[in-house]
Amino acid sequence: TLAIQVGEGITGWVAETKQGALVGDTERHPKGIHIPGTSETNESMLAVPVIFEDRLIGVIVNVKVGINQYTGDHLRLLTILANHAAVSIFNARLIERLAASARTDPLTGLANRRAFEQALEQRLAAVAPETFAVLMLDVDGLKQVNDARGHAAGDAVLKRVASVLSSDLRETDLATRWGGDEFLLLMPGVDQVGALSLARRIGGTLLNPDDPAGPISASIGTAAFPADGTTAVGLLAAADRSMYVEKRQRVA
């Protein structure tokens, strides 16, 4: 793969000027550069920028051995192709962003409830589901933070929790803002012992008094498949019960 900088060579010049180029002899073009390791055969070249709403997406390049191998008709045809490509690429990127936003919590950047439900159902629908754990976290006293210090302070608390949950994630784990002050973690391959160990570590990290958001108290419950449930409803109910047992113990 060859990386071309904007302004470098004919391709970079096309990217910089956002104008197509019909080059009869690349060796004689003032912007032509020889790429080390390639032959010095005389070549013709077409280069057309791919642009959408004045934003450069890329450059389409055609090269043919021999001089003066392309005509203005070739350049016009490639320009039409580049315009169609620009619209298609933009639409594809837009669809990707919309799909991502539909599965993402806008405040914390974590997965949202819908994404978690889909991931959990996929785990349960596997032909031979592996052990996995669900961790449920409820931020204690968030309403009091909002009332006393404002919603910006409450948002900072939620973002801090999201950051802690995301800090040690494996590629297969899924951190989720379930809604309000509740968060969930889906952890494939983790049993109840591993989930409890992680819960203690997360709780300890959140209580760090030196963090700008201040120490954060959270109630954390866990449930493991299949020991604590074999359905989505059963696992979430088990994690919820575990969380409230832990909350009552700390209050007592």
Image: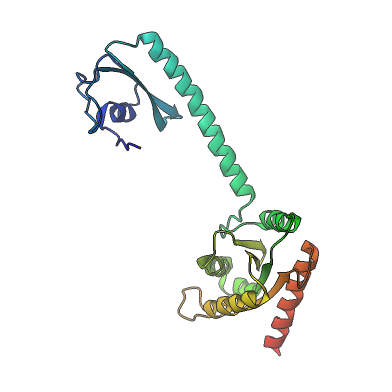
Which of the two residues, 88 or 182, is positioned nearer the viewer here?
Answer: 88
179 to 38, vertically: above or below: below
Residue 87: % across, % down? 52, 28
Which of the two residues, 162 or 32, is positioned nearer the viewer here?
Answer: 32
- Is 209 on the left or on the right of 116, as rendered? left
Quadrant showing the C terminus: bottom right
Residue at the outermost bottom position: 252
245 to 125, vertically: above or below: below
Quadrant showing the N terminus: top left
Residue found 55% across the figure and 80% down from its top: 204
Look at the image and name its color scheme. rainbow
Residue 72: % across, % down? 36, 9
64 to 126, vertically: above or below: above
- Is 249 on the left or on the right of 47, as rendered? right
Quarter occupied by residue 108: bottom right
User: Can residue 140 be seen by looking at this rendering?
Assistant: no
Residue found 40% across the figure and 9% down from its top: 73
Residue 188: % across, % down? 64, 64
4 to 227, vertically: above or below: above
- Is 216 on the left or on the right of 134, as rendered? left
Quarter occupied by residue 65: top left
User: Can residue 189 be seen by looking at this rendering?
Assistant: yes
Residue found 49% across the figure and 81% down from its top: 209
Residue found 70% across the figure and 82% down from its top: 246
- Is 161 on the left or on the right of 43, as rendered? right
Quarter occupied by residue 41: top left
Q: How many marks?
A: 0
